[in-house]
Amino acid sequence: MTSTIAFFNNKGGVSKTTTTFNLGWMLAERGHTVILVDADPQCNLTGMVLDLTESDALENFYKDNPKRNLKEALEPAFASRPKPLEPVECVAVEGQPNLYLIPGHVGLAEDEVSLGIAQQLSESVQALKNLPGSFRHLFQITAERYGADYVLVDLSPGLGSINQNLVMTADFFAVPASPDVFSVMAMESLARVIPRWATWARNASQLEALADADYPFPKPDLKFLGTIVQRYRLKNGEPTEAFRSYFDELDRAIDDTLVPALEESGLMFAPDKYEEAGLEGSVRLASIPDFNTLIANSQQSRKPVFSLTQDDVNRKGFIWDTQSKNIESYHALFSQLASRVESLTE
């Protein structure tokens, strides 16, 4: 059975894309078949897999590879064409044979309005009834084609209808965050938004029009995996004092606001399941310090930070010794993260 995981936070700049790419690679390294989905119109995840250094590279990819992106794969549903959705011919991720990508499209945001209307009026406007279940159906048939164990979906930082749909039709969701005031505020926002979305999804799944659609809207069974805290600096192996204070504030927002709201909406596992998976305090899947200069090497080589080689980093002597230890440390962190995800989703 395929597990679909949405990575979502309505705050930007919290390493959602980097997390999706690195975790997907690590799960593939551990023997799983993984499909990455770039559902952010900015297409940053696509840029981590494809060489987009030329100014027209993405446009040329679309031209040379029709239907091999999320927007065009969904077009039969959104353009009401008399043909069924077909599995996406995914892009194989170079260097990791178990990893694939459904590329993003800069025009995906154009479907936001159509989906929003469909999710409100599909019971009365029959032409719209196939849209709410189309994303989930596309992921399922593509996962079946590749025998995928995981579908990891990288979302934009908005609160629009596409994100609402992708979170609520996933099996699990995780929230990347940073130890800063904006992530603290985001937790409070998510505590209001996610339960409201869950109520909508439960009601939508009971509508006769959506149940009888070509792509039925699924009964939601969403569970929260936890948070992944990133983008902070270390001093003597610990977060610096400035970041430490925000860690404490973030933990309070999660423990006192987000978790109770999710529990009330039935979106949490039992506490012992998180304990068995080895999560840190405040339902934290992982704490991953800043990649510093390694992020540039990762982007340039289109590899995760923990798979970088000395040639990728182009360093020698003492500098390489230090970098190699950091790379090993990140490999251990992402391996632990993957293990926890496996435990919670098995």
Image (spheres, grey):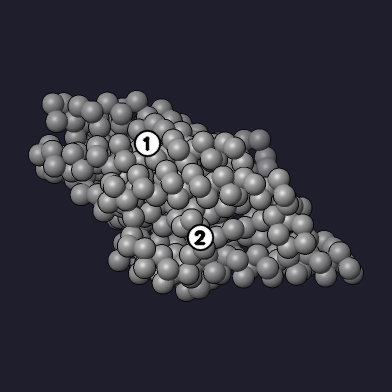
Q: Point out the image quarter for the N terminus.
A: bottom left
Q: What is the x, y in percent for residue 22?
A: 57, 59
User: Residue at coordinates 33% horizontally, 60% vertically from top-left?
Assistant: 269
Q: Nearer the viewer, mark 2 or mark 1?
A: 2
The kind of secondary structure element at disc 1 is helix
Q: Nearer the viewer, residue 303 or 74?
A: 303
In the image, what residue occupies the spot 39% across and 49% down?
259
Q: For label 2, count other residues whose C-alpha is less than 10 Å away and answer few (under 14), some (14-19) or many (20+).
A: few
> 9 and 237: which one is in front?
237
Identify which residue is drawn at 19% across, 35% down. Answer: 129
The C terminus lies in which quarter of the figure? bottom left
Q: Residue 2 at x, y = what percent?
A: 33, 62
Q: Are marks 2 and 1 in contact (CB under 8 Å)?
A: no
**Which picture quadrant has residue 69?**
top left
Point out residue 171 in the picture as x, y percentages from the top left corner. 32, 55
The amino acid at mark 1 is Arg
Residue under numbered circle 1: 192
Q: Give the CA distance from mark 2 to mark 1.
A: 22 Å
Q: Pointer 2: what residue?
A: 281
- Residue 210 location, x and y as percent? 16, 39
**Label whose residue precedes the other's in the sequence (2 or 1):** 1
In the displayed structure, would residue 273 be above or below residue 188?
A: below
